[in-house]
Image (cartoon, helix red, strand yellow):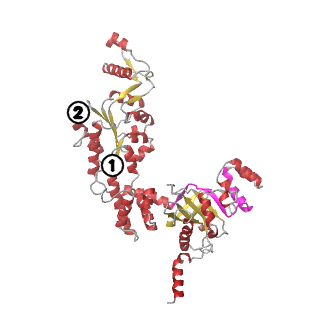
Amino acid sequence: MSLKQFIENRRTNETNESVIPLNEVKFNEKKLEKVAELYGKIMGKQMKGRFYKLGAENFKRKSGSGRGIRTMNEGGEQLRFNWDKKLSKKGLYELTSIDYWRDSDRDFAKPYRRVELAQQDNVIQVLAKVVKALQVGQIAEAEEIIDDANMLFEARNTKDVAKWIQDNGMNPNYASPSKLDNLKKSAKKAGKLEALMIFLGEEETNEFEDKLENSKKQLKEVLYSDPETVFDDIEDLLTLIVAGNWNALLILGDPGIGKTYHIYEGPRSIGKLLGPEGDKWTYHPGMKASLKSFYKLIFMERDKCIIFDEADPLLKSAEIQLILKPLLDTKKERWAEHANGTQPATGKTHKELEDMAVFTDILIANGGIYNDDKTISQEDYNAKGSSTKIWYQMPGKFKFTGQMIFISNMSYDDVVKAGGSALLSRSIFIDVHLARKDVLKRIKTIGYNSVRKDPDLDTDDIDKILNAAGGSSSEELNGSEITYITPELKRQQSKGPSTRTLELGKALLKSGLPNWENLLALYS
């Protein structure tokens, strides 16, 4: 081989990525993937590193539907190069737009900005301007190819739009926000729009995000749990509550799996820990209560550990939630307060409030009749005693020194949807189906099963993904204890591995990104 041939061969190898003629504007779908990678490599020089392909996806949004190639660079930025199949001519497509996600964007279904490309232009000629347009979106950055019509599509305000319409002789009826699409078409037809048009990102549905979200369903379908571990934790947490080391415990999960048994009858049940029901603890199965009756119940049992079994109605009641919030808190003193139909508590000292509570106990013990409108005074009671009918009101405020345990068939998400986030944040909570060890076992099972259908991955890759996402398969799955501590730690824990993490990890690992582990930890 001659030196000239050697140099030519090397030059060919070095530039092999560019053999696709980028001076063309139409490509078949197979070549489009390569084009997207090449564009990503060029644009990456001005951004946070070279872009690697995550895969093709269909998307749909208000401004239209299409198909694109999603890419990500080492800095966590994403670009999606889009084309419209409706514009296909003999199976050839041209790029119509580019979407951009910043490294801080966690919503994969809402890009930060979008640039639309004129059909007659060659993308390679304007890539530098595209980068600035996507990142900054300001006219001054690319004024020779970006018209001030872009101001319209940033949705500044109706006044700005109306002024632009007036200055450009357009139809004044298009000034309203609902008519922007009509204005765009009219402006384009009149030659008012230039090569690039910048848009703020808009909500969409796309296959990439859908795949990540749909993977969560597998967690419910794959049954691979360790009940003994979970139920041991329930009894450990019960011990913590009855010792007064925490004020509230929420036990969530499907019916018929033994949640109540381990509280009420199990080897370390509350009866074995505190003795017979009535003195130090009470049990209320399937309770439905008005705010008035619930307030009275917790007053009368204010120094006990109260168990509410089948507690779904209580956890769904917004009024009862308001009463519960201060009682489940970690403050040294917890006070329940309700002003409607109770004895006024305004201006009273804590000593006076506690005396009021004790006197109400005496009235109840002597057959008093609960009445929202009237009550007997201490003086009248001392003078007349049981010789007169005793009416009493509940104190408008009282000190609560007990604990509460809620057993519910609701899930964590159900409680959040019912407005119970504040209760969860004040409680230790355990979802029998979401114990961390069980989650990791099931994710690992799902991952191992999935590699049978994916020749590009093996079980070692699944272990790498779990480790990168903070779920060590060797440590987490082989005997380490599950710890349910504070709500803050639990919330941090909930950000750990999930089946969504697994799917994202697969895409990042396959992309070839050299720092895929760091990106997975960032986005999981």
Q: Nearer the viewer, residue 120 or 46?
A: 46
Image spot of residue 160 (x, y percent): 70, 49
Q: Which residue in the rendered view is the most extreme toward the front?
A: 3
Q: For residue 487, what is the image quadrant?
A: top left
Name the N-terminal-most of marks 1 and 2.
Answer: 2
Image spot of residue 81 (x, y percent): 56, 65
Residue at the image position 26 percent from the left and 50 percent from the top: 228
Q: Provide the residue designation for mark 2.
A: 276
- Residue 192 sits inside the magenta stretch: yes
Q: Which residue in the rendered view is the most extreme toward the top?
A: 383
Q: Is residue 227 left or right of residue 147?
A: left
- Residue 293 sits inside the magenta stretch: no
> In this view of the protein, can residue 420 be seen by the observer?
no
- What kind of residue is marked 1? Val
Q: For residue 201, what is the image quadrant?
A: bottom right
Residue at the image position 48 percent from the left and 63 percent from the top: 74
User: Which quadrant of the figure contains the C terminus?
Assistant: bottom left
Q: Is residue 441 left or right of residue 128?
A: left
Q: Provide the residue designation for mark 1.
A: 432
Q: Nearer the viewer, residue 186 or 325?
A: 325
Label disc, if present, on residue 331 of the rendered structure: none
Q: Which residue in the rendered view is the most extreme toward the bottom?
A: 1
